[in-house]
Image (spheres, helix red, strand yellow):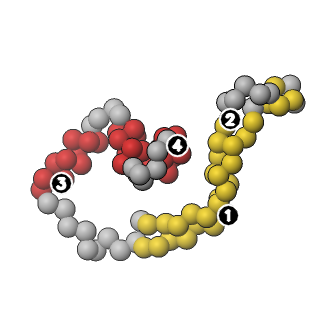
Amino acid sequence: DRVQIVGVYRALAATANGQSTTSGIFRTVVLVNNVQILGRDVSQLNFMPEDIKTIKNLSKRSDILSILGRSLSPSIHGHEVIKKALAL
């Protein structure tokens, strides 16, 4: 499926005892306003036997989430956690 997500990427300051700290570590979230499905057409997918073998081999790897996260928008550097979340 292809989707378009519209939202706000926000960094939240850490709090301790109700007061904000300046440790420089921020928790980041995406506040999603809208999700639109762009396409679900799977009828034109053609998998070659080599593709199926590669997919099965990848599925057995313990670092598959990291691989998928790196392959999602490789031109965008950083934000590995967000990319992994989107890959899920």
Three-letter residue code for mark 3: Asp
- Residues under numbered marks 4 and 2 in contact, where contact means CB atoms less than 8 Å apart: no
User: Label 2 vs label 1: CA separation?
Assistant: 22 Å
Is 22 drawn above or below residue 66 in the view shown? above
Q: Callout 2, which amino acid? A: Phe
Q: Secondary structure at mark 4?
A: loop
Secondary element at image label 2: strand
Of labels 4 and 2, earlier in sequence is 2
Q: Quadrant of residue 14?
A: top right
Residue located at (22% from left, 45% from top): 56
Q: Secondary structure at mark 3?
A: helix
Identify the mark at residue 26; answer none if there is no mark. Answer: 2
- The answer to which image quadrant residue 59 occupies is top left
Q: Quadrant of residue 51?
A: bottom left
- Give me the residue at 35% from left, 41% from top: 67
Label 3 crowd (10 A; few <14 / some 14-19 / many >=20): few
Vertical position of residue 51 compared to residue 3: above or below: above
Could you say which is closer to the camera, residue 24 or residue 32? Answer: 24
N-terminal label among 4 and 3: 3
Q: Which dot, 4 or 1, sits closer to the camera?
A: 4
Choose mark 4 or mark 3, whichever is in front.
4
| Residue at image mark 1 | 33
Question: The residue under label 4 is which amino acid type?
Answer: His
The numbered mark, 4 or 1, whose residue comes first in the sequence reads 1
- The amino acid at mark 1 is Asn
Q: In the structure shown, which secondary structural element does the residue marked by tag 1 occupy?
A: strand
In space, the residues marked 4 and 2 are separated at their CA atoms by: 12 Å
CA gap, disc 2 to disc 3? 40 Å
Of label 3 and label 1, which has the lower sequence position?
A: 1
